[in-house]
Image (cartoon, rainbow, N blue to C red):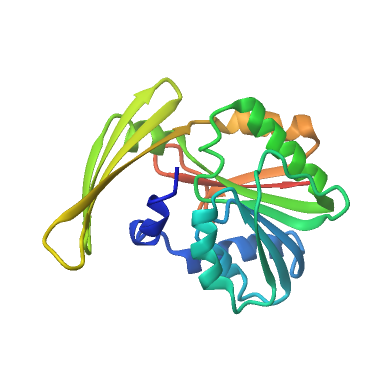
């Protein structure tokens, strides 16, 4: 996943306001009295959100992803930021016992891509270990409404610049399988390059997530709409969580 896809990823996420989302995260950190320090970002992708967060120079950011293709694109955006370090890392194997963070974030579908609950528990446990006492874990989750009702078994067609693609979904229990077909116009001809991408996301209930967090030791668990407002069952598509060590 993400080899050829990474070259066009930024053109496909046109609906995400990274500047606004970054502000929501910073405001949430301020709510917990965290205005500077060490920040770990898990699953940074091509660095769009990292770039916005890095403009807050009070934070020193370590960002990692398990895709070298995604990181290559992130590097070009973040090379001039002295407060950012990028590394390639398997998120299930990281464990910074000797280096702890004031806050850990993992956003924009990362959690939903974890379809094995045991791996999710491993990740949350490693995050807990990597936080300082009083540190904050912030993450988001595609809601049941989005995965089951909005995406579900639906099909979508998009055309953006020189990219045409179809998006076909298949819903099976708490999993949604994404089958993407891309057609990329070649610069020097009227021909198109075609490639496919297959992904799968899992729906986790709010209750399930809270139970996992509490079992690990997190407290002061809260959740909101991604804009920071109140979660609404049949309206909120992305849920923003915070939990304290």
Instruction: Name the side, left or right, on which 236 lies relative to 243.
Output: left
Report the front residue among 181 and 193: 193
Residue 147 point in image, percent of width and height = 40, 35
Residue 107 point in image, percent of width and height = 56, 51
Residue 19 point in image, percent of width and height = 49, 69
Q: How many marks?
A: 0
Tell me which corner region of the image, top left, top right, bottom left or bottom right, holds residue 129: top right
**Residue that extends furthest to the left in the rendered view of this protein:** 190
Instruction: Name the side, left or right, on which 191 lies relative to 75.
Output: left
Report the front residue among 118 and 102: 118
Determine the residue positioned at 76% across, 70% down.
36
Determine the residue positioned at 63% across, 33% down.
209
Is residue 122 among what the camera can see? yes
Instruction: Name the side, left or right, on which 209 lies relative to 8.
Output: right
Q: Is residue 155 above or below residue 73?
A: above
Determine the residue positioned at 51% across, 52% down.
226
Determine the residue positioned at 18% across, 54% down.
192
**Residue that extends furthest to the front in the rendered view of this protein:** 188
Instruction: Name the side, left or right, on which 239 lies relative to 14.
Output: right
Report the front residue among 226 and 102: 102
Is residue 23 among what the camera can see? no
Residue 106 point in image, percent of width and height = 61, 50
Quarter of the rendering occupied by the N terminus: top left
Tell me which corner region of the image, top left, top right, bottom left or bottom right, holds residue 188: bottom left
Q: Is residue 128 above or below residue 184?
A: above
């Amino acid at each position: 996943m993400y080899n050829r896809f990474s070259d066009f990823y930024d053109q496909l996420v046109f609906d995400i306001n990274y500047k606004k989302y970054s502000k929501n995260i910073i405001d949430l950190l301020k709510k917990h009295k965290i205005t500077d320090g060490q920040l770990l970002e898990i699953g940074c992708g091509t660095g769009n959100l990292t770039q916005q967060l890095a403009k807050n120079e009070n934070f020193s950011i370590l960002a990692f992803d398990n895709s070298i293709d995604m990181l290559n694109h992130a590097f070009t955006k973040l090379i001039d930021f002295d407060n950012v370090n990028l590394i390639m890392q398997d998120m299930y194997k990281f464990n910074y016992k000797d280096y702890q963070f004031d806050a850990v974030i993992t956003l924009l579908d990362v959690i939903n891509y974890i379809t094995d609950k045991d791996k999710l528990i491993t990740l949350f446990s490693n995050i807990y270990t990597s936080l300082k006492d009083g540190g904050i874990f912030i993450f988001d989750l595609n809601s049941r409404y989005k995965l089951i009702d909005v995406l579900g078994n639906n099909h979508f067609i998009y055309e953006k610049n020189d990219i045409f693609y179809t998006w076909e979904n298949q819903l099976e229990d708490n999993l949604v399988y994404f089958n993407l077909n891309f057609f990329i116009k070649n610069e020097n001809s009227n021909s198109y390059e075609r490639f496919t991408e297959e992904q799968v996301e899992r729906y986790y209930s709010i209750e399930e997530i809270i139970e996992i967090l509490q079992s690990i030791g997190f407290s002061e668990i809260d959740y909101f709409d991604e804009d920071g407002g109140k979660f609404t069952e049949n309206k909120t598509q992305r849920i923003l969580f915070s939990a304290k060590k």
